[in-house]
Amino acid sequence: MKWNPDNFKGILATVVVLCSFAYFFVITFFERNADPQVIIAIVAALSTTQQYYFGSSQGANKKDQIISDAINQNK
């Protein structure tokens, strides 16, 4: 498989999500005492990743495509 820089955001988002779920799994099932600051940081990283990857960037890409299509139709 050839390296494609366009896949980096997806790979990074997947790694953040999997690491977050792994941490929550360890805390939940092995009853470790979790530092509340660490949990807050992980939830923040998880939510930021999800919002960026599935939120505004996807909407911006669709908007750019719509504008490009409209410009091409007028030519």
Image (spheres, helix red, strand yellow):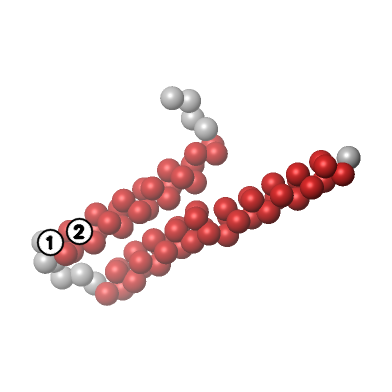
Quarter-of-image position of residue 31? bottom left
Q: Position of residue 53 (x, y in %)?
A: 50, 54
What amino acid type should be assigned to the residue bearing mark 2? Phe
Residue at numbered disc 2: 25
Contact (Cβ within 8 Å) of mark 2 with mark 1 = yes
Furthest residue toward bottom: 36
- Name the residue rendered at 27%, 56% in the picture: 21
Q: Quadrant of the C terminus?
A: top right
Total marks drawn?
Answer: 2
- Name the residue rendered at 29%, 69% in the picture: 39
Residue at numbered disc 1: 29
**Relative side of 58 to 35, left or right:** right
Q: Position of residue 42 (x, y in %)?
A: 34, 64
Q: Position of residue 32 (x, y in %)?
A: 13, 66
Q: Secondary structure at mark 2?
A: helix
The one nearer the camera, 35 or 58, is 58
The one nearer the camera, 72 or 35, is 72
- Name the residue rendered at 40%, 67% in the picture: 44
Label 2 Cα crowd, 10 Å radius (few <14 / some 14-19 / many 20+):
few
Label 1 Cα crowd, 10 Å radius (few <14 / some 14-19 / many 20+):
few
The one nearer the camera, 59 or 33, is 59
Mark 2–mark 1 distance (CA, rounded to whole Å): 6 Å
Q: Position of residue 8 (x, y in %)?
A: 49, 42
Q: Residue 21 got which mark?
A: none
Q: Secondary structure at mark 1?
A: helix
What amino acid type should be assigned to the residue bearing mark 1? Phe
**Relative side of 66 to 37, left or right:** right
* As drawn, 22 above or below 72: below
* As drawn, 1 above or below 45: above
Furthest residue toward left: 30
Quarter-of-image position of residue 45? bottom left
